[in-house]
Image (cartoon, rainbow, N blue to C red):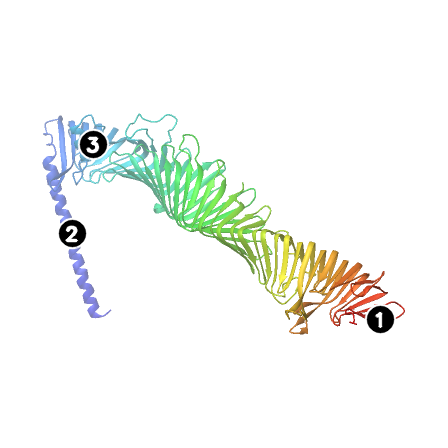
Amino acid sequence: MKRSEAARYARWSAILALTLAGITSGIYVHRRYVAVVEKRHAPPPLAQNEEKRSISLTFSKVDANRTVFTVQASKSTDLRGQDISLLEEVKITVFGKAGDRNDVIHTQSCRYAKADGGIQCDGNVVIDLQSAADAEQEAKDPRAVPNVIHVETTGVTFEKATGRAQTVQPVRFSFVNGDGEGVGAVYFSEQGRLTLVRDVRITIHPMEEAGNAKGRKPGTNKEVVLKGSSLEMEKLVKKVVLLGPATATTSEQELKAGELDLLLDAQNRAQTVIAVPGTLSELPQVTAQGAKGPSTLQAGKLTANLTPAGWIRTIEAENSVHGTSANGEFRSDTGEVEMWPQVNQAKLVTLRGDVKVDGRDPQSGTKRHLVTDALQLSFAGGKPDEPSRIQHAETLSRGTIEWTDTGGARSRMTADKLVLDFAATKKAQQLVATGGVQTERELTGRPLQTATASRGDAQLDETGGWSQITLHGKVHLKEGEKNAEAEEAVFVKASQTSVLTGQAFVRDEGSETRATKITFHQATGDIEAEGKVRSTDFSAKTSTVQLSPAPSNISSDRLQGNSKSGRALYTGHARLWQGPSVMEADSIELLRDTRVLNARGNVRGVFPQEGQRDAKTKQPSICHFSSGTLTFWDLENRAHLEKDVMVQSADQRMRAPVLDLYFNREANGKQGSEGTLQLTRAVGTGGVMVEQGERRGTAEHGVYVAEDQKFVLSGGTPTLYDATEGTTTGRELTFNIADDTITVDSGNGTRTLTKHRVQR
C-alpha cells in the first residue's frame, strides 16, 4: 500500500471511530434522561416499616412533549421485598407518536415490574384499535357505530420502554364485516401496528347493507375466507398484510398467493384484496370449480375490489396474465373482471395487451386460436345459486381467429373487429367480422386459399369450429394462380363448397369466367355457374378448341364443369365465339383433355372462308351451318353434324341428315396449327341436297371440296333440278362453282352442262 493511501485510510478510520463514539454517548445520555423522567412519574416506594400498600396507578410515556401512551390501573398493590406491583382493572391507551391513535388495551389484572416498567397480563385481554378521529366522532355522537377493530387474547406482555405488547396465545379479532383469528401477536403502539405470528384466518361476511352486521341476505352468503402464515395490520393506513403462503376462498373460487394485502375503508370494512408473489415468489392464482373441471387465473398481481357490503366488485390482473379451463386457455398483459352484484360471478371480462386465447373441443379435437390486442367478454347471470354463462365476446382492436381441424386443415379469419355470440348452452354459435376482413384456408395438397372483404360472419358448430363462412362487400379470393371476385362469398365446410354471388368472376392464368353465381365443389372439383355466364380463354394454349387465334369466349345461362376432368358444359342459350367464328346451341360442352367440343340442340354457327371472297363486298366468304348436334375434334380439325344439317355460304347451300366437316388452319396465308380454321371439305350422307342459285341437286352422298369449289353428288340416284336445263340424272353429278358448270357422269361417259343457255 502506498504511504498516501495508508494516511488517507487512517484519517477515515479516525473519523468513523469518533462518529461511533458520539452516537454511543448520545444514546447513553438519552437513556439516562428517560430513566429520570420515568422515575419521577413512578409511584413512590414503600416505607421500610410497611408490608404493602394499595393505591391507584397512572403513568405515561412522553416523546417530544407528546404522550405516546398512558397506563391506568384502578388499584396497585406493592408487596414488601418485591419489585413487582399487582395492577387491577388495567387500561392502556395508546396515542402513538403522531397522536393520531386511540387504541385501548383492557384487562382485569396484570403484574407491573418497576425495574423496567414491563406489564404482564395472564388473563383475558381486549385490544380495541381505533383512530383518534373515530374516537372524537364517537365522543360527539354516542349513537354512532364504533369504528373499531376488536382484538381478544390472553397472556399479554406490555413493554413500557418500547410500547410493545405481545402474546404467544391464540388471538381473535373482528371488524365491521369480518372477523379473524391467529396464534401469537405483537402490537407496536408507536406505529399502531398489530402482527399475528402464525396460523392466521380472516372471514369476510358480505352484507345486504353496508355496515349492517345483521343485514345478510338469506341464501346469498358468499363468505370470503383468507388464510396465511402471519399477518400485519396497520389501522392508520387501513392495511392488513397476510403473508404467505396465503389463500382467499369462497364456495366457488380459491385464491393462492405469496402475499395478500387487505385494504380497509374509513369504516374498517374490507375494501380491496391485493395478491402478489411476496417473498415466496408464488404467483397469485385463482381457481374456480366448474361442471367440466377447474379453471384458473394466474398473474403477477391480482387485485379484488370489494363493495362496502363485502361483495367483489372488480378483479384486476397485471403482468403475464394466464387463464386455463377444461376447454382451453388465454394469455394477456392485463385483465379486468367486472362482477355481478352480490353473487361474485363474472359479468364483464376485459383483456388487454398481446391477448391470445386457445380453445379445444375434447371430443372432436377441433382447436381455436384467437390473437388480438384487446378482448372483452360479457356474461349472463347475476342470480344467486345459478352459474353465470358467457354470452358475448368481441375484440376491441384488430384480431385473428384460427381453427384447426383434426385432419390438420386450418382456417383463419382476421378483421378490425371480431364479435362472437354464444347460445344458452355456452357454445359459440356465430362470429361476425367487420372492417378489412381477411380469411385463409389451408387444405392438404391444395394451394393456400385467401379472401378479403368488407365484412363477414361464420356459423359455428357444436365443437366450436366453423360450419359456414360468409363474406360480404367487394370480396376478393385467391387460390394459387386463381383469382375471384364477388359481392358475396359463402364457404360451407360440410359440403366443401364455395359460392360466389353478385357480379362474380373467377380468373386463372389463361381464362376467366363471369356469372351471377359461381359454385366451387372443392372435394370433387365440380364448378357450377348460373346467370349471365361468360367464359374467356385468353391464350390459345388453354383453349379447348381453337377456331381462330383470337381469345375464345363462350356465354350461356348455366355452366357445369369440373377442374379435374377439364369438362365444361354450358347450357341455355350457349354461344361461343372466337374471332370471326361463332357457334350457338342449347348446350355446348368442352372437354379440355381430349380437346373436343359437343354442341346439342339448335346448333348454329358461322366461320369465315379466307380463301374465298364475296363478289360484291370482296370480304372473306362466310360459311353458315346449323344442325341438331355437333361434335368438333380440335386435334383432328373435324366436325360431325347430325339432325337437319345445313351448311351454306352466300349462294351455295348443302343439307343432309349427317354431315362431316374437315378443316385446316391458315396463319398469315399459310397452313399452321395457330391460324384461323378453314373449311376444306364437307361430306354429307343419308340423303344430301345441294343448292346453287336456281339449281338444286339431290343424292345419297354429297361432298363439297373448298379448294376446287365444287359439289360432288353420288349414291342413290343423283338428280339435278335446273330451271334452264331441266332435270338431269347420272351416276355422279359435279357442281363446278368457279366456272358455273355441272359435270354429269352417267356411267357411259361424262358430259358438261353450263348454266346459261346460248342465245339464238
x and y percentages locating residue 222 in the rendered image: 38, 31
Residue type indicated by callout 2: Ile
Residue 22, compared with residue 165, is above or below; it is: below
Say which label, 1 or 3, has the lower sequence index. 3
Q: Which residue is identified by label 3?
A: 104
Q: How far is mark 2 from mark 1, CA to CA?
A: 153 Å
Residue 625 sits in which quadrant?
A: bottom right
Residue 170 location, quadrant: top left
Residue sitting at x 21%, y 67%: 6
- Mark 2, residue position: 23
Image quarter hosting the N terminus: bottom left
Left or right: where 518 falls relative to 25? right
Q: Is residue 246 visible?
A: no
| Quarter of the rendering occupied by the C terminus | bottom right
**For the residues marked 1 and 3, what is the alpha-carbon distance in whole angstroms?**
149 Å
Amino acid at the residue labelled 1? Arg
* Residue type, mark 3 in image: Val
Can you name the residue that lies furthest to the right here? 748
